[in-house]
Image (tube, grey):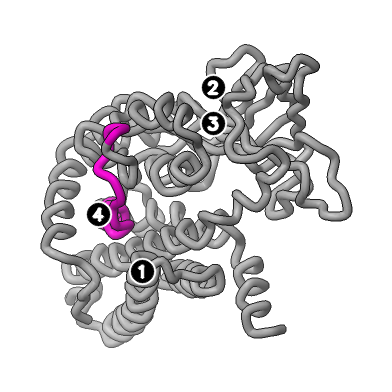
Amino acid sequence: MKRTVYTEEHEAFRDTIRTFIAKEVSPYYADWEKANQAPRELFHKLGALGAMSFDIPEEYGGPGPTSFKFQAVIQEETARAAVTLGHFTVTTGIVLPYLLRLANEEQKTRWLPGVATGETVLCIAMTEPGTGSDLAGIRTTARLSEDGTHYVLNGAKTFITGIRNSELCVVAARTAAPNDDRRFGLSLLVVPTDSPGFEFGRKLDKIGMKASDTNEISFTDVMVPVENLLGEQDQGFSYLGQNLPRERLSIGVGAVSTATAAIDFAREYVRERQVFGKPVAHFQNTKFVLAECAAEVAAGQALVDRGLDLDEAGALTPADAARIKLFCTEMGGRVIDKCLQLHGGYGYMLEYPIARLYADARVNRIFGGTSEVMKTIIAKDLGL
């Protein structure tokens, strides 16, 4: 189906990103996967390209308000090439919005120019060994010192993406005991990753997303200046939910993009692969499977494109975003699985990009809120 969501400016940016990926990413991607992380200099190169500074005001080195569609273009192009840009989307799409919305002028002056150039890369630490979707159960503590100059941070986090390539980490910690509202008492602290007592734990070995590091970290009496508190103390839980609609839209964009790429890879493969003396593409089952996949992807693409327009208009609701994430990630899993099946045994080999897409896509139904959480949000929107 013809898409109308992008302008000529978006398409020109697409050409730039496609060229960048072909030159700076694809030739080296196998090495990144073996290292379990992208090289740090990738973010400097993305900064020089202007891709790290979305929405950063001009006075801090950015272009000012920027359509999220430019970030969607990057996701589509990385999917097309079956690569990722490390934890780029975490920095620009998830963590940076917290700084833009919550940081005061002094903090913006201190942090944003470095983010814009790629000198300062961001990550976020919410999940704990015993706390996943239930963020109100966070146990990491940040105790205000007696002289009121700093917080003393203690605790542990897990499933932290990109920490080894990041200079700053936004940490969700408990600054007060919960009252009748379990969500009260959480705060967001911006913590330099080279702080004394900030320790890297295991680099976790994942099924997919091999070019992005995921780690355990711990804090032992880490001193965090009070000047690094984001927003108001004890109100962090409400902040954590403010960017979730766009984050979930972003995951939907990625899911549809990887499903689209899977169809392209499968279509190319079945045209070339010979079975019983004829291309696999000649068999009716092949045609029917790819036709089903194409129809499902078209439905997901329409949903995502509508979400991109709603986001641009400031009208994307949490329930809308939940619908997008639920449908697109579940659909993406089905489509990629079918496309891998059409590759036969070769689809299970990592030398074929379909295998990488299959492994990478599985987490889409988990992070940013599980499919089960999305169903809960949608049911509540239905008045149930």
Nearest the camera: 114 or 372? Answer: 114
Label pair 2/3, CB-CB below 8 angstroms: yes
Residue 132 % position (x, y): 69, 50
Cα separation, mark 2 vs mark 3, equals 6 Å
Residue occupied by mark 1: 313
Taking 62 as reference, is 283 above or below it? below
Cα separation, mark 1 vs mark 2, equals 36 Å
Residue occupied by mark 3: 169
Alpha-carbon neighbours of circle 4 within 10 Å: few (<14), some, or many (≥20)? many
In front: mark 3 or mark 4?
A: 3
User: Which amino acid is tagged 1?
Assistant: Ala
Q: Which residues are magenta?
A: 59-79
Quadrant where the image shows the C terminus: bottom right
Secondary element at tag 4: helix
Residue occupied by mark 2: 193
Q: Which residue sits at x=27%, y=83%?
A: 287
In front: mark 2 or mark 4?
A: 2
